[in-house]
Image (cartoon, rainbow, N blue to C red):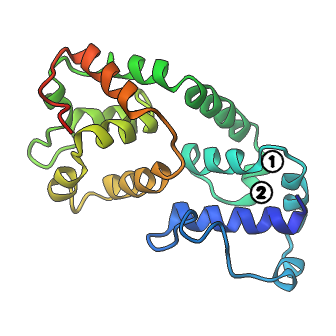
Amino acid sequence: MTPYEAYVLYCALKMHFTTEDYDFIKYNGKFKTSVDNFERRRDKFFFAKLAKRKDIKEYLISSFVSSNSTWIGDLVNNSSIEEHFTDWKKRTQALSYFYEEDLKKLLTNLDENVIVKEHQHPFLLKLVLRKKVSIETLVILNDLLNFFPHWNKQLESDILWKDVHLLCRKYRSFLQYDKKAMKAITLKVFSDNAFCAA
């Protein structure tokens, strides 16, 4: 990959994760820019460094999902971003295991984890914000239970939730997993066949 191609990929993924309208999958990673624009950038040497990676797309996705920074300088010159990437790879490669471990941290009554009381963050969201439960677990559980519409209604003025919701929506396109297997794990952990009829 050339530095310019790395730049286009970075811009497209950054737009995907930080804006409502742009969809990386829908637009096939295309991003309107030019070589001239790239050549005028003062930070283009970061993209030359990024272009040397074999796993650029995965590295960028993990960076946008796991870190608070979207600046290219932070993404290529920061050892903690590399640690985020290693953790992300470990989680996504053993997703079933980490999902089950996360579920064991929740309250035994599944509903109690997702119910919003008096416009306060539900228990599950609190654990995600504290990084005790992964964003992957939140995305998967919502796929099974579809509680985000309820959270949107109850937490509509909550800025933290809006950011997490956008991240979950954008990340869902890239998170590959076996829905049947995750449903079975959820049923096993909570021993309740009623909630997962979806």
- Residue 58 location (% of width, % of height): 68, 45
For image coordinates 39% across by 51% down, the residue present is 164
Determine whether, in the image, residue 103 is placed left or right of residue 34: left
For image coordinates 21% across by 20% down, the residue present is 107
Indicate the secondary structure of the residue bearing disc 2: helix
- Residue 116 location (% of width, % of height): 14, 43
Q: Which residue, given by chain and number where applicable, does mark 1 sit on?
A: 77
For image coordinates 77% across by 44% down, the residue present is 55
For image coordinates 62% across by 44% down, the residue present is 62
- Residue 31 location (% of width, % of height): 67, 75
Determine whether, in the image, residue 145 is placed left or right of residue 24: left
User: Which corner quadrant of the image does residue 184 belong to?
Assistant: top left
Indicate the secondary structure of the residue bearing disc 1: loop
Q: Say above or below: 197 vs 164.
A: above
Q: Nearer the viewer, residue 196 or 19?
A: 196
Q: Say above or below: 105 vs 182.
A: above
- Residue 74 location (% of width, % of height): 73, 52
Q: Nearer the viewer, residue 154 or 192?
A: 192
Determine whether, in the image, residue 67 is placed left or right of residue 71: left
Q: Say above or below: 13 vs 122.
A: below
* Quadrant the C terminus occupies: top left
* Quadrant the N terminus occupies: bottom right
Q: Which mark is residue 42?
A: none
- Mark 2–mark 1 Cα distance, whole angstroms, equals 6 Å
Whether label 2 touches label 1, CB < 8 Å: yes
Amino acid type at mark 2: Gly
Q: Which residue, given by chain and number where applicable, does mark 2 sit on?
A: 73
Amino acid type at mark 1: Asn
